[in-house]
Image (cartoon, grey):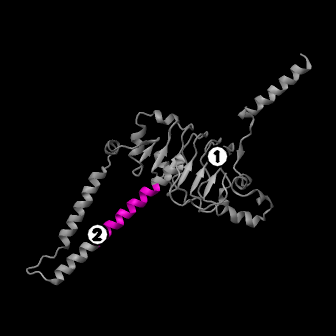
Amino acid sequence: MNESEEIEKEDLGKCADLFSFDLVKPVRLSLHLIVKRHLPPDAKDWSHEKILEALQKITHLRLDRENISDIDGLELLSDKVTNIYFQHNQIRRIENLECLKNLQFLTLSGNQIKCVENLRHLEKLYFLDLSFNQVKDFDIDEFPQSLIILNLKGNPCVTHPDHRGRIIQDLPKLKQLDEVEISSDEKLEAGFKTKEEEEGEEKEGEDDEEDEDIPVRDSGGSKDIAHLTTSTLMRSQQRLELDLKEHLKHSQELDLIREKYNIPSSRTPRVGLKQK
């Protein structure tokens, strides 16, 4: 082999190394990594106190594609963190999230997770993406009851004969599973009432309350009319409050879907620290 062939072979070896992801050593999630992704370049010259103060203002933690194998070091963040993006790493276990009690959005797609664990304490978690991991089976009690959207697509567990049914019946707030909306038939089969039935029962309850509030007296009078008017106004106010709560609930769901599919929001975006 002449000198030019040797140089060419060496160059090809270097190129192969660039595309060999197995040569990249997995890393543990560290303070240095969080600072690198979320604070400006001059943060390396900041005091320890200033760095900690800045870390506690983070609301969206973006650490995707960093070759992370272990979740750690999150205790330095505050309970202001609502969204975490850990997709496309080498994470093997779900752990050390206890300090993030207000977490609402968590994506762990494209990792090496085999067990669903350490999530039940996240009582405000609405969105969980565990797609394309290695989960063969799970304990349904490990999923928070607050979940509205759950994605297990690409895991061995989805081949279970009753995969959707067993999840739907135990997560009553769930509206989307594996990127597919949960149908009314699936809700009925799981033992839940349809929206129409719930609305019908609510209306019957309101009618019963109205009957109870109407004063039954031998002779009408201004006091009776005033009492009836007040009761009607109170019920109207209660209905408005219920409608507002329902609207807010749907708004939260839309926010979660926008986050997942990167759909721009028409509302003013949240103010946060620098993100990659």
In the rendered image, residue 167, in percent from the top left (x then y), is placed at 42, 44
What range is drawn magenta here? 234-252
Q: Nearer the viewer, residue 207 or 98?
A: 207
Q: Sequence-wise, which precedes: disc 1 or disc 2?
A: 1
**Which residue appears at 41% of the width and 52% of the height?**
173
Label 2 environment density (alpha carbons within 10 Å; few <14, some 14–19, many ≥20): few
Secondary structure at numbered mark 1: loop
- Element type where label 2 sits in the image: helix
Residue identifier under label 1: 64
Which is more foreground, mark 1 or mark 2?
Answer: 2
Give the quadrant of residue 249.
Answer: bottom left
Q: Where is residue 77 shown, x and y percent of the image?
A: 65, 60
Q: Main secondary structure of the magenta part?
A: helix
Name the residue type under label 2: Ser
Locate residue 190 relative to residue 7 in the image: left or right.
Answer: left
- For disc 2, the marked residue is 236
- Residue 267: percent from left, percent from top: 51, 59
Whether residue 4 sits left or right of residue 38 in the image: it is right
Asked whether, in this view, residue 221 is left or right of residue 58, the answer is: left
How far is disc 1 from disc 2 in space, using C-alphas? Answer: 48 Å
Q: 34 and 139: which one is in front? A: 34
Q: Is residue 245 magenta?
A: yes
Quarter of the image where one finds residue 13 = top right
| Residue 259 place in picture, x, y as percent | 53, 50
* Amino acid at the residue labelled 1: Asp
Residue at the spot x=72%, y=45% of the render?
Answer: 27
